[in-house]
Image (cartoon, rainbow, N blue to C red):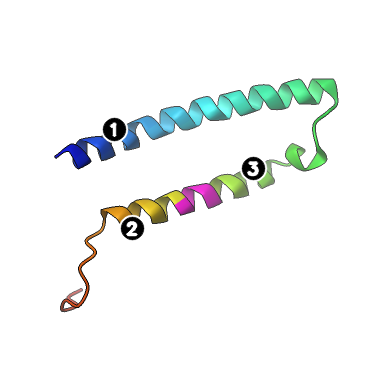
């Protein structure tokens, strides 16, 4: 029961945390852009999109690994 509550809380809080991290990153990026210290690779939105996609994929694999039934040797029934 506690695992289910924890999983639901994580899934509910994850978008909120992601938004605040994104807002914080945008603020830092704007400050660096104004100061002229922004590296050229950070000016590309595709770079950040690829990084975010990779992180989400890894998190998804980790969550699936720890939440799926790990019983092996059973009969396969689609």
Question: Which numbered dot is residue 9?
Answer: 1
Neighbor class of circle 3 (other Cα within 10 Å; few <14, some 14-19, many 20+) is few
CB atoms of marks 3 and 2 within 8 Å: no
Question: Which numbered dot is residue 65?
Answer: 2
The residue located at (60%, 47%) in the rendering is 51
Quadrant for the C terminus, please: bottom left
Q: In terms of sequence position, does the residue under pointer 1 or pointer 3 come before the other? A: 1
Of helix, strand and loop, which one carries label 1?
helix
Between 44 and 73, the one lying in front of the other is: 73
Span of residues in magenta? 54-58
The alpha-carbon separation of the residues under discs 3 and 2 comes to 26 Å
Q: In terms of sequence position, does the residue under pointer 3 or pointer 2 come before the other? A: 3
Residue 67 left/right relative to 47: left
CB atoms of marks 1 and 3 within 8 Å: no
Q: Main secondary structure of the magenta part?
A: helix
Of helix, strand and loop, which one carries label 3?
helix
Residue 67 percent across, percent down from the top left: 27, 53
* Image quadrant in which you'd find residue 37: top right
* Image quadrant in which you'd find residue 23: top right
Q: Is residue 56 magenta?
A: yes
Q: In terms of sequence position, does the residue under pointer 2 or pointer 1 come before the other? A: 1
Of helix, strand and loop, which one carries label 2?
helix
Does 38 appear above or below 48?
A: above
The alpha-carbon separation of the residues under discs 2 and 1 comes to 19 Å
Residue 41 percent across, percent down from the top left: 77, 43
The residue located at (56%, 45%) in the rendering is 52
Residue 38 left/right relative to 69: right
Q: Nearer the viewer, mark 3 or mark 2?
A: 2
The alpha-carbon separation of the residues under discs 1 and 3 comes to 26 Å
Neighbor class of circle 2 (other Cα within 10 Å; few <14, some 14-19, many 20+) is few
Residue 9 percent across, percent down from the top left: 29, 32
Give the residue at mark 3: 48
């Amino acid at each position: 029961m506690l695992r289910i509550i924890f999983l639901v809380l994580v899934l509910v809080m994850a978008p909120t945390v992601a938004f605040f991290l994104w807002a914080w990153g945008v603020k830092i990026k704007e400050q660096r852009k104004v100061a002229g210290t922004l590296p050229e690779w950070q000016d590309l939105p595709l770079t950040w999109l690829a990084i975010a996609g990779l992180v989400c994929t890894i998190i998804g694999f980790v969550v699936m690994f720890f939440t799926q039934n790990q019983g092996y040797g059973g009969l396969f029934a689609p």
